[in-house]
Every structure is written in C-alpha cells, then in structure tokens.
Image (cartoon, coloured by chain):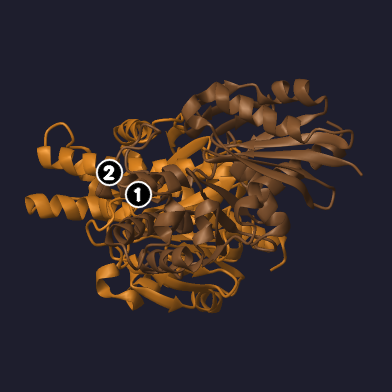
Chain colours: A brown, B orange
Amino acid sequence: MPEVIAVDVGGTSIRAAAIDIDGELRRERVRETPAADGPDAVVAAVRAAARELAGPDVVAAGVVVPGVVDTAAGIARYATNLGWRDVPLRDLLTADLGVPVVVEHDVRAAGRAELAFGSARGAGDCLLVWLGTGIAGVVVADGRILDGAKRMAGEIGHVPVWPDGEPCACGQRGCTEVYASAAGIARRYLARTGVRLAAAEIATRLHTDPAATAVWAEAVDALGLALASGTLLLDPAVIVLGGGLAGAGAALREPVAAALAARLAWRAAPEVRTSPLAGRAGLLGAGLIAWEAIREGR
Amino acid sequence: MPEVIAVDVGGTSIRAAAIDIDGELRRERVRETPAADGPDAVVAAVRAAARELAGPDVVAAGVVVPGVVDTAAGIARYATNLGWRDVPLRDLLTADLGVPVVVEHDVRAAGRAELAFGSARGAGDCLLVWLGTGIAGVVVADGRILDGAKRMAGEIGHVPVWPDGEPCACGQRGCTEVYASAAGIARRYLARTGVRLAAAEIATRLHTDPAATAVWAEAVDALGLALASGTLLLDPAVIVLGGGLAGAGAALREPVAAALAARLAWRAAPEVRTSPLAGRAGLLGAGLIAWEAIREGR
C-alpha cells in the first residue's frame, strides 16, 4: 500500500513518519534536533530520519521546516533555530530517496493539517499560532491560507509586542517569541533562577514556583498583545494555539483568552482553542503536501 | 444622465457629491461635522448634505461612515468620533431621498475606490491605512478585501503599539491612533504647547517648531510599529497611506517608510505609498457602492 514519508524539522526535535493516503501515521519516529552540533549536523539528521523510513511503498516525501522556505526551489532559506541558510533540502532528499520531495514551511503545513483534520475545520476565518521553539502563525481568510506577497504572512512571532523590549534572535527587540516561545520561556526562567528547565516543565510548576508563575504570566501577556493585534487586523472567528506549548492545555488557553479579552476594549474576542493535533500537525501537513504533489503529478 | 449621491461622513467634515456612472464627481460640497453639537446634529447635517444633492436624475445613494457599520441593516452601530450608537441611516435617508440607500464603512469603501482607481490597483496583497480623525485600515489579500468573521478586519488604528500607553477613546491604551491620527496629533501637540492646531497645520511646522517635530516623530514611530505588525501578519506588497493626513505627502511617507524598515530586522519592508485619491477615496467608494446597488437591483 503506497505511502509518503513526512518529516517535521523543529528546533527541538525531528519527527518523521510514513503516512498513508488516509492520513494514518505508520512507523513514527522522534529524534532530538542536534542544533548544538551546527547546521550540517541538523541536515544530516533530517536525511537520516527520512532514509530510515525509505521503502518500496514510498511514493513521495514532504519535509516541513521553520523559518523562511522557498517552496518552488525546495530550499530552506533561513531558519534561526537550526542555523540554516539556503539549504537545498529538496535536491538532497530526492537524491537520497529517489522519489519526488516537497519542502514547505512547517507552520503553513500545520495550518493545512488544522484545516483538514483539526480545530480550524469549518472556520472560515482563523488565526493559527504555533508555539514551539519559536512562534509562527497561519492566517486563514475565507477558508484559504493567506500567503501574502512573498509567502511570508503569519509571522506573529515577530510582532513587536514590547517595542524596544528584550532582544530577539531575529535582530529585533520585544518580539512575541522572545517572551512566549518555548525557547523564550526557558531562557527567561533560566535568567531568573539560574535553573535550566524546558518550557513544558515550567508549565507544570505554575502553582508552586513563583519564578515559573511570573515567566508564564509574562508569556501570556505577550501572547495577549500579539493576538489582540492579530484580532484587530484579521478579525478571526477562532484562534487556534498549536505546537508543543499548546500541550499545556487549559493552563495556556484560559489565561491567554483572558489576556486577549483584556486587550480588546471595544470588540469581543474570538474563541481561543488549543489544537487537538498537538505536536503532530506539522507531520500531518507534511504528509498532505506530499500526497498533493503526487496527485498533481509533480 | 443618471447619477448617485455619495456622502462621506468624517469626524471633521462631511463630504458629499453627485457621481455619474464613470466616477466623475459633480456638485461636490464639504461642510464641517458638527460633532461638538452632539450625535443628532451630525445626523441632521448628513441628511441635509444628501438632500441638497437630491434631484430627478438621482437613482441611488451611498453613505460611508467611520466606526462599526452593519451594512445589511443599514445601521451605523458605533462611531466614537461622531458620538453615534445604532443610527438607522439607511432608513432615514431612504425616507428623505426616495431612492435605494447603501450604508458602508468609510474605510472599506475607500479601499474599494483605491482598488478601482488608486494606489492599490493591481496590487494583489496590500494594506490600506486611512489616517483621518481616527485611523482605520483595509486588508487586501489576493486582490480581495478581507472582511474577517464579523466584517471587522483592518482595525490597525487600535493595534496596541505602546501597551499600557496613553489612553484611547476606545477604552484601550496605547493604540496607534492615540499617537498617529489627526485627532491624536492635535491633542498631543495641544498638551505639549497649550496651542490648538490641526494636524495638517502641525505637519507644515516640522522644521521650525520643536513641539511639532516631536509629536510628528512620535506619530511616525507609532505608525512604524503598527505597520511592522501589519507587515509581519499580512505580508503586503504595498502599504497605501490615505485619508487627510496623507496630504502631508513625503513628510509622512518618507519617515514612515524608514520607521517601518527599522522595525523589520529580518525581512524587507513593503513599499509605502500615499494615496493619489487623497481625501476623496471615501466619497468615490460611496459612489461605487451606490452604483453597485443599482446594478444588483437592490
């Protein structure tokens, strides 16, 4: 039975699976992203993850990566968290696997999965926000993903929520993701306490650890501001929070919804949901675009 | 020769004209908005402006107003600068004029005019920002106006550029329009100097009056932040500045373009243009929607 290889390259982990035409996952594997070993090590890990799943039934592959992606050329142009610049991922993986390979932006792919299987199904206008190592978003308007002029729409992670605030890896200051991404939360907790903890771990300490409480509250405040800007500009019916941090569930959703409402004096806030796809949205989206490439005969 | 009546109700002036099928303006009139005399006086002034243009050739009327508009019901729901709440404008004017009347949001109508005649013609993705007494915007994605779930998209005037900053009439703090609308600039100049001047007048004093220079620079900074958020979320090819303040031309466009670029560390800024339609975009848009109502047999 034919299948595609799907790979979701994140700043923390590389998730890979074979996916059949119905979107069923097979042989899912997760490995750590060797970001500390440099950009080439990450490329090697992605290739290894894909090769492990190779087989006679594989008809295509979809790889999704963060940052700026040139889909037409199959090149990962720029990804801060991976140290990548102009990585020709499509050509590398096509050589490895011998099947058509499609490269896409991870959050755009996750948005496709949310529209197909998740919280955004049926919502004509929504804003999908992925809270991972970094933060990115997808704008859905009238049921379609809004690309923008250069396919760079949805970058809510770099909206300047606190102008001239803490520096961001992007070169700007006060970006949403400085405060509210998994990396940002961990970094800010470390700065306060000297203790290195993952954001997910910090989320479990909200009622017992004042530093965790404070850092989380600041993340929620930053998200409330960014989502207020997003709501005012886009007027979504629903805001879907996805990515690893969304695993915190109500501990994230409830205060974020309250922070958003508090920043909107004169209009109602859209509903805030967490994604039911959790960490798998990118992977499912990678599978979708690979199947799409087959259907379109690319 | 048939014509429609177009009325553009602003916080400062009410502009009215008859417009033929080719978009040619006839008998254009501008009167001051009697906002200080209360909401009913503004309604009376709008009705008088429309009645003045009535005649046997008039086949429809389009009225455009700021704030929140219920187009389907023909009701101006909420307009801070006019003091309006639930004004049944369509029914009032239909009774006065005896022709079909369409009520629309002024900036959405102006966006239609920009797409048809102005700076946005041919730009698939753009952000139109109207700098008048208040600030509002229209998002154009793939050549179409983005409505949003409740037709409330584009409210860039209330994006929180300086969270917890100066209070806004909307009940929020630090909104773009607190700093960068014509009313905001005049109010902030008055607070600094004790002198009451219109924003357009302040714009002419940039090289001679330090208070004017400072207030203008703060307006530009606020706009740079709001447009950075808009660019990151929407990725427009072009940003068009319209409304009364856009009459300042290069004195507005050049520093705003620089401020926007300075707030975008990792991506190029879209081109910033001022509208060639100047103060007439809303009026032309009101004409467009009136003609559209006739074509659609409403």
Q: How many marks?
A: 2
Q: Chain of mark 2?
A: A
Q: Quadrant of the C terminus of chain A?
A: top right
Q: Quadrant of the N terminus of chain A?
A: top right
Amino acid type at circle 1 is Val
In the displayed structure, A18 sits above or below A116; it is above
Can you tell which mark lies on residue A151? none
Can you tell which mark lies on residue A161? 1
At which x and y percent is residue A216? 36, 58
At which x and y percent is residue A238? 56, 63
Question: Which residue has dot 2 on it?
Answer: A165
Q: Chain of mark 1?
A: A
At which x and y percent is residue B49? 42, 66
Residue at x 71%, y 25% (from the top left corner): A90
Q: Residue furthest left?
A: B194
Task: Please indicate, yes or no, whether residue A42 appears anywhere in the rendered image.
Answer: yes
Q: Nearer the viewer, residue A206 or B246?
A: A206
Residue at x 65%, y 51% (from the top left corner): A280
